[in-house]
Amino acid sequence: MVPLIVNTEAATDLKIFSSYLLLQQKHKQAEREARAWRRAAVGIGAIALVAVAGLAASVNRPPPKPLITRVDADGSVAVLGRATADYTAAAPEIEHFLKTWILWVRAVPADASRREQNLASAMRVLRPRALSRLKGWLAQYRRPHDPPPLTVEIISITAESGERYEIRWNEVASDPQGADPLTLRWTAEVNVQQVAPAHDVDLTNPLGLYITDFRWMPSSGMPAGSPSSHQFE
């Protein structure tokens, strides 16, 4: 039987070489992980810098100027622009504002959700006295369930003195029983106030126009109440 001869020196060299390879692999893995962490740190730092710069820019950015539309005498849009703090609404713009408000509060669309939207829009441009007056009228005369549809036709809007305007319109109500529509003429006196436009009301009231008080009544010679009980005082 031939004895087995083991080269201990070669075995030792092999172990040393294997350990060296293992150390090299661990070293490369550590380098890769370190590079990945450095890249992540750089990326997070860049994102933080961008966020801080964006926050600083948003804080230092002046508030946006309200977007407005100029309205011709016939109600069509003429020019698109931005209001400044000293902007003064022109007569056609005030007339368009008043026409829209009367349509919101006096007309009765067949769609109930549309009626609620119109009233909400109308209330947003009222000062406390006018808002209280409108709520009192709604509580006394408004029919909450299935009111007959009523259309409004603006006849004229006239500036009287200072902030006061006179509005005249016809209300045409359909008869649920099928009779001919009944038309009544109404007149309102409305006080309008303009304040410097603010960026937080860009969409709801870009011109800064508000109604401080109003009164409406059937025109002289007409019946005291309209078919839909739309009357006041």
Image (cartoon, rainbow, N blue to C red):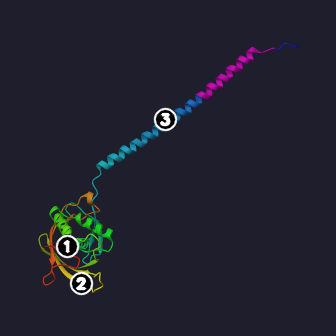
Query: Badge 1: how crowded within 10 Å, few (<14), some, or many (20+)?
Result: some
Q: Nearer the viewer, residue 143 or 71?
A: 143
Residue furthest to the right: 1
Q: Amino acid at mark 1?
A: Ala
Q: Tell me where residue 66 appears, x and y as whole percent.
A: 27, 61
Q: Could you say which disc has been placed on residue 38 in the image?
A: 3
Q: Tell me where residue 175 appears, x and y as whole percent.
A: 27, 82
Q: Tell me where residue 99 appears, x and y as whole percent.
A: 23, 74
Q: Nearer the viewer, residue 188 or 134?
A: 134
* Tag 1 residue: 91
Give above or below for 228 relative to 2: below
Give the quarter of the image for residue 215. bottom left
Q: Tell me where residue 60 appears, x and y as whole percent.
A: 29, 49
Query: Badge 3: how crowded within 10 Å, few (<14), some, or many (20+)?
Result: few
Residue 23 is a magenta residue = yes
Residue furthest to the front: 177
Q: Amino acid at mark 2?
A: Leu
Give above or below for 164 relative to 42: below
* Tag 2 residue: 182
Precedes in sequence: disc 3 or disc 1: 3
Query: Badge 2: how crowded within 10 Å, few (<14), some, or many (20+)?
Result: few
Q: Which residues are the magenta region?
A: 5-26
Give the quarter of the image for residue 142. bottom left
Give the quarter of the image for residue 123. bottom left
Quadrant location, the N terminus: top right
